[in-house]
Image: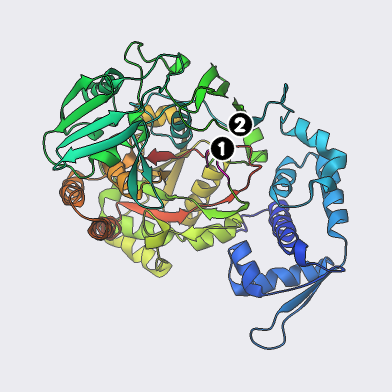
């Protein structure tokens, strides 16, 4: 098999690792020397100890440093750098500016290095990345998105980036606290229940909407009824247990359920229940909520959010958020990600994303992949570690579950692929793979296609967009779909939503008998305590793995730093 990663790409990866290492050791470096433990680089580079040593030897061979291994088990190793780090940074940035290496410059700017080192080219960098100083002492964050903006309607939204925007624009009655796994008051300053069936919410006074009207119980009732009665909502399941909503007073709401549901508070903590004004029809172009930001501008190519000065809690530190649509080529160069609310304090680090990437099997379509042996062969073909190595990923964590904590390495045996294909009677029929229309998704799909060619599997690749995803035009065409799922802070609600939200692929493409079995398990799940819920989640994941309903790939690792600009990560979100 030909080497997939080009020499240019390999140099980029090595440069990224080298500068990340030097930045990590900067504080302890004395006269170009520092002592360290190999485990530090193992964790920093997300690779094995063997690969750490191999990479250090490569740096040594290229004349960048001298590596002296520690004498004896547990003793620190030593690095002697041949050049000043500041000089290397300045020379590298100069080369990036002169040769248009925007992606490499962006990666370097993420690192915790003294900003004075790049002062000579700072204005060029700002122009290069579209960063501009805020006027009138405004703190403005400029960010990028490499696709069309999709819906901001809480009834329909299922994409991670737009879901984040809704959380900036609106507020819910209560909030989920992920650190304590509990529900906290929010717009409702107090709430009480009568046996998990009748819930009473006491609302804060003086909560203003963006159009300066005050929030009352009528707005809460309107919002709930809007979700409950909409035929277009992907999230109607959140309100299907609600029988009545009463407003006995302007700041009191009583919600009565058809049956007891201990999970109900988690339901209404989801952003889909952001309270909207009852006296104004919802308009995506004039999004009116109570959130910390208001919608200042929305066009085909730009969204601007402005801090809401009358927000009922602490005002955001940022004055404005600007999100620009850019070309896919530009996004491939400026590889920033919006993963966190920009107002929260985030340390520079690598972080495992709360989600996973997968290859979905469309088992609602009459195709060869309905044969269990075919899916088993596809499972053994999906060697994520080989994929990561071939594609030059710096960081990845293998997935076998929805969440990293339950994941473990999956045993793959390529020797079984041909016998399994023979058992299924596979004769080279085309198997259509759909993937997102951006470069990294194509690289993954193309890698898998080439792996299949070695075994006579005829994969045909097709890109798709989010409008295709929402309009379901792929459902009757795709045999397999590369996709990702991003969880909210509430992992148990997200797990429910993955199977209840009929916009997501799980409900669209899992076989009916599997969904019926899963639904029965989830009914029990909603009545259980946390420990038993985890057990049920594992049972459902076991069922998915045993039947290869989808093929788990990996939990992405993202770089998180206070300076991240933002380029959308295009994956669906389950609340």
Residue at point 33%, 11% (across, down): 279
Q: Quadrant of residue 195?
A: top left
Query: Most extreme residue toward the bottom, as rendered?
Result: 72
Residue 10 coordinates in the image, percent (x, y): 69, 56
Question: The N terminus appears in which quarter of the rendering?
Answer: bottom right
Q: Which residue is mark 2?
A: 318
Question: Depth check: 99 or 298 in front?
Answer: 298
Left or right of 100: which side holds 467? Answer: left
* Figure check: 152 above or below 54: above
Residue 246 coordinates in the image, percent (x, y): 18, 23
Asked whether 344 falls inside the magenta stretch, the response is yes
Count of numbered circles in the view? 2
Q: Do tag 1 and tag 2 residues touch (Cβ < 8 Å)? A: yes
Q: Secondary structure at mark 2?
A: loop
Residue at point 63%, 36% (across, down): 331
Question: Depth check: 555 or 270 in front?
Answer: 270
Residue 395 coordinates in the image, percent (x, y): 57, 58
Q: Looking at the image, tell me whether mark 1 or mark 2 is earlier in sequence order.
A: 2
Residue 258 coordinates in the image, percent (x, y): 11, 34
Question: Depth check: 326 or 546 in front?
Answer: 326
Q: Quadrant of residue 64?
A: bottom right
Q: Residues within 10 Å of mark 1 (few under 14, many from 20)?
A: few
From the image, give the main secondary structure of the stretch colored magenta: loop
Asked whether 402 falls inside the magenta stretch, the response is no
Q: Secondary structure at mark 1?
A: loop
Q: Which residue is mark 1?
A: 343
Query: Most extreme residue toward the left, as rendered?
Result: 258
Which span is picked out in magenta?
340-345
Question: Depth check: 106 or 9 in front?
Answer: 106
Residue 491 visible, this orientation: yes
Question: The C terminus appears in which quarter of the rendering?
Answer: top left
């Amino acid at each position: 098999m030909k080497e997939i990663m080009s020499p240019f790409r390999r140099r980029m990866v090595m440069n990224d690792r080298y500068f990340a290492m030097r930045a990590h050791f900067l504080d302890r470096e004395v006269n170009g020397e520092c002592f360290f433990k190999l485990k530090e680089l193992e964790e920093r580079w997300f690779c094995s100890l063997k690969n750490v040593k191999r990479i250090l030897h490569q740096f040594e061979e290229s004349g960048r440093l001298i590596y002296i291994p520690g004498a004896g088990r547990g003793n620190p190793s030593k690095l002697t750098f041949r050049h000043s780090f500041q000089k290397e940074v300045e020379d590298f940035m100069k080369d990036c500016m002169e040769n248009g290496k925007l992606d490499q410059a962006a990666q370097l700017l993420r690192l915790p290095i003294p900003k004075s080192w790049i002062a000579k080219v700072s204005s060029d960098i700002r122009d290069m990345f579209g960063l501009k100083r805020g006027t009138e002492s405004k703190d403005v964050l400029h960010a990028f998105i490499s696709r069309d903006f999709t819906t901001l309607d809480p009834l329909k939204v299922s994409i991670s980036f737009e879901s984040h925007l809704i959380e900036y624009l609106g507020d819910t009655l209560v909030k989920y606290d992920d650190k304590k796994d509990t529900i906290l008051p929010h717009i409702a300053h107090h709430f009480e229940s009568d046996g998990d069936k009748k819930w009473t919410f006491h609302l804060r006074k003086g909560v203003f909407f963006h159009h300066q009207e005050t929030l009352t119980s009528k707005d809460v009732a309107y919002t709930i009824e809007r979700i409950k009665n909409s035929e277009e909502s992907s999230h109607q399941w959140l309100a299907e247990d609600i029988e009545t909503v009463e407003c006995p007073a302007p700041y009191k709401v009583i919600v009565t359920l058809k049956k007891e549901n201990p999970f109900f508070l988690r339901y209404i903590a989801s952003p889909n229940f952001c309270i909207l004004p009852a006296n104004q029809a919802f308009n995506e172009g004039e999004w009116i909520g109570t959130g910390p930001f208001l919608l200042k501008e929305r066009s085909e190519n730009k969204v601007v959010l402005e801090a809401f000065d009358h927000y009922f809690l602490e005002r955001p530190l940022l004055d404005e958020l600007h999100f620009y649509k850019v070309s896919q080529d530009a996004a491939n160069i400026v590889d920033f990600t919006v993963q966190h609310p920009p107002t929260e304090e985030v340390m520079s680090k690598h972080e495992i994303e709360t989600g996973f990437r997968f290859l979905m099997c469309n088992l609602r379509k009459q195709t060869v992949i309905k044969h269990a042996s075919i899916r088993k062969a596809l499972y053994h073909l999906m060697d994520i570690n080989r994929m990561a190595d071939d594609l030059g990923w710096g960081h990845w964590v293998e997935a076998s579950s929805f969440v990293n904590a339950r994941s473990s390495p999956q045993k793959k045996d390529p020797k079984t692929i041909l016998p399994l294909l023979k058992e299924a009677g596979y004769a080279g029929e085309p198997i259509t793979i759909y993937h997102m229309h951006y470069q990294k998704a194509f690289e993954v799909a193309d890698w898998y296609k080439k792996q299949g060619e070695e075994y006579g599997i005829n994969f045909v690749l097709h890109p798709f967009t989010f409008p295709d995803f929402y309009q379901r035009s792929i459902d009757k065409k795709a045999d397999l779909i590369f996709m990702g799922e991003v969880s909210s802070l509430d992992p148990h609600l997200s797990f429910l939503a993955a199977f209840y939200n009929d916009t997501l692929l799980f409900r669209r493409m899992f076989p009916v008998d599997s969904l019926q079995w899963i639904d029965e398990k989830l009914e029990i799940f909603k009545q259980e305590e946390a420990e038993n819920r985890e057990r049920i989640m594992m049972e459902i994941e076991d069922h998915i793995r045993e039947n290869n309903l989808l093929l788990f790939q990996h939990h992405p690792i993202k770089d998180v730093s206070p300076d991240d600009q933002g380029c959308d990560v295009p994956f669906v979100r389950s609340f």
